[in-house]
Image (cartoon, rainbow, N blue to C red):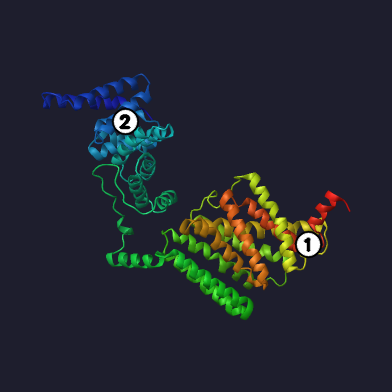
Amino acid sequence: MASILAEAGTWQGRAQNREVRNHASVTSREAPTTEQLQQAAIALEAGHKAEARRLLEEMVQADPRSERGWLWLADAVDSGEERRFCLTQVLAINRRNALARRGLEALGVGPARCPLLESATAALKAGHRSEARHLLKAAIQAEPRSERGWLWLADAVDSGEERRFCLTQVLTINRRNALARRRLEALGPGPARPPVKGWNALPTPRSEQPSTIEAEGLQCIRGALCSHPTLTALAYLLALATAEVLTTLIAPRGGLVVHGVLLLILLLHTAATWGHPSHRLLLSLAFAPLIRMLSLSMPLTRFPLVYWYFIVSVPLFAAAIIALRMLDFSRAGIGLNLKALPLQVLVALTGMSFGYVEYRILQPDPLAQNFTWDEIWLPTLILLVCTGFAEELIFRGMMQQAVTETMGRIWGVLYVAVIFAVLHVGYQSLPDVIFVLNVAVFFGLARMVTGSIVGVSLAHGLTNVLLFLTMPLGVNHFDLIAYHLYGP
């Protein structure tokens, strides 16, 4: 597209002639503006667009309603999105500006981006927070509903009160912005103060504003459901334990019904408290009754026992992926990383000892007929992925992270460990429940220290490989190690 600078120069000449005829003198405030325009014109003519852009950005920062500043800046920016924004600002100031209207029509319909945001981003990356803050304030004054502008300004301001205000504005513009929501939750409740003097909070769109009665009712419901997250979590733990005991010792079908009711209540509770930090805890807790329902209700009798783990894990993996996306958990947040790798290797090796001990407690039948590669490779893979990784992703990854955010790190370890042990009541062995509780505490601490679930997933998988494959087939790893160390 041809440059609009030449046409802008003609328009500016006519405008300046009118100003000379109408005003006897130029005020001290206008003189620097005229000088900046002349310097910007010289820079543009010489091909120094970066210098012209800097001068014009300073001009619109000083006066966000500078019609000439935005018009000339449209020729100094690089992208069509920024040019479209500049010309839109011109028309917002003077809707009769034919030059800006023709330029906007030539660009066509499309997204617009404030050019000050790019300069602010560069300043933030360079560590010039004061410069970035000044640019972002000007960008927000030009575009009050700039989601990115408010989000970046939260990084440039100094106080928690100003940061809280900026993040609140982001969520007012886009309530699904997960990054702003997580940062606001990390800041916690408190006062908010606008970083721009005289600025008022953006109004909530009318379509999203509930009526006064509805708002008060929702607030009462949310307050009642979220006021005591620790007591709520303990109540659900008691209900889960009751359902598990009923399922194992009294009436399996009745226990299945109780698990189903508990799952429904947890989902409804999650929906009622959505947006509050505890909604992550509630949705992650729903996986406990879901696991039991899948294991009891799926038609698996025609399949070999080893394939039960695979079949049940498929809907569990699908549900976990959907829940993690809904809750905006990052991969690092749930421990999918390789932090503290040497320590994770040591954690993984503990699975050999845990598998040996649990076999001595339960002594289950083997999942394979013979200890040959053809018969054990697939069961080994299923146990590593469908029990080790799947269960650790849900319990130590998603659930422990959710409990930690709501109740603290120690509760995150202990509470999830108790739930994990309760779900082992089905083996009808009190020593095994106690053993699993201790192992789950160890896994939780390892996840907390390393920040990863890789080590505990491997340890969990190795535990099950020894428990259901090698030890029942008479292959004792400790005997093999002793044989190689000390001989027959």
Closest to the observer, 59 or 398: 398
Kind of residue sitting beneath label 1: Met
Tag in front: 2 or 1: 1
Which element is circle 1 on? loop
Which element is circle 2 on? helix
- Outermost front residue: 486
Kind of residue sitting beneath label 2: Glu
Chain-order first, disc 2 or disc 1: 2
The x, y position of residue 15, in whole percent, is 19, 27
Callout 2 crowding tier (Cα within 10 Å): few <14, some 14–19, many ≥20: many
Is residue 387 visible in the rendered image? The answer is yes
Residue at 43% x, 31% y is 126
| Image quadrant assignment for residue 434 | bottom right
Q: Where the N terminus falls, by quadrant?
A: top left
Closest to the observer, 391 or 88: 391
Residue at 28% x, 27% y is 8
Callout 1 crowding tier (Cα within 10 Å): few <14, some 14–19, many ≥20: many
Closest to the observer, 335 or 478: 478
The x, y position of residue 214, in whole percent, is 31, 66
Is residue 473 depicted above or below 255 in this figure? above
Q: Is 258 displayed left or right of 309 in the figure?
A: left
Question: Which residue does the numbered mark 1 point to in the structure image?
Answer: 471
Question: For residue 57, which numbered disc appears in the image?
Answer: 2
The x, y position of residue 265, in whole percent, is 48, 71
Is residue 167 depicted above or below 366 in this figure? above
Q: Is 418 displayed left or right of 478 in the figure?
A: left
